[in-house]
Image (spheres, helix red, strand yellow):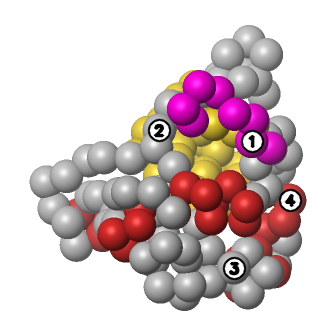
Amino acid sequence: MRNAAVDVWHCDALGVYSGAVADNPGTNFLRGIQKTNAKGVATFKTIYPGFYQGRAVHVHVKVHMGGSVVHTGQLFFPPAVTNAVYAKNPYARHGTRPDTSNAADAIYRNGGSKGMLALERSGAGYVGSIAVGVHV
């Protein structure tokens, strides 16, 4: 869908969310909204997300169209990549790996596997991609 607003947010390497809703007023990091282009593609550049206790590594996503939310979901990451990322700083300072695997995560178990990003190496990082279906 072209001209849809795609809204994403996630926590930093130490598991901290930005924004007043996360009890962190006056901050605005790792949050963004992009409009999809003529081909229905939105692109974001960010860091590998952190985690917090009881949740697998994820990115929140909402898609807005014509003033309505047409999709709410979460994007997940392959465990092998997460383990490699979390072996390095600054992620290692938070713990060598998340305490909750994808399979043990309540959101992932309830359809989150459809939100698994396809990751490819790109230089020192990764490029993730996914096609998201929406209800209009």
Residue 32 locus on image (x, y percent): 43, 39
Disc 4 marks which amino acid? Lys
Task: Name the image quarter holding the N terminus.
Answer: top right
Instruction: Identify the residue at image location x=20%, y=66%.
Output: 24
Q: Is residue 123 magenta?
A: yes
* Circle 1 residue: 119
Task: State the mark number for residue 114.
Answer: 4
Q: Which residue is mark 2?
A: 46
| Mark toward the viewer: 2 or 4 | 2
Mark 2 or mark 4, earlier in chain: 2
Picture coordinates of residue 129, whole percent (x, y): 75, 37
Between disc 3 and disc 4, whose residue precedes?
Answer: 3
Which secondary structure lies at badge 1? strand
Q: Earlier in the sequence, mark 2 or mark 3?
A: 2
Amino acid tagged 2: Thr
Classify mark 4: helix, strand or loop: helix
Q: Which dot marks residue 101?
A: 3
Q: Residue, x 41% and y 62% (percent of image)?
A: 91
Dot 2 or dot 1: first in sequence order is 2
Crowding near the residue tagged with mark 4, few <14, some 14–19, many ≥20 C-alpha atoms within 10 Å: some
- The amino acid pointed to by label 3 is Ser
Which of the two discs, 3 and 1, labels the residue nearer the N terminus?
Answer: 3
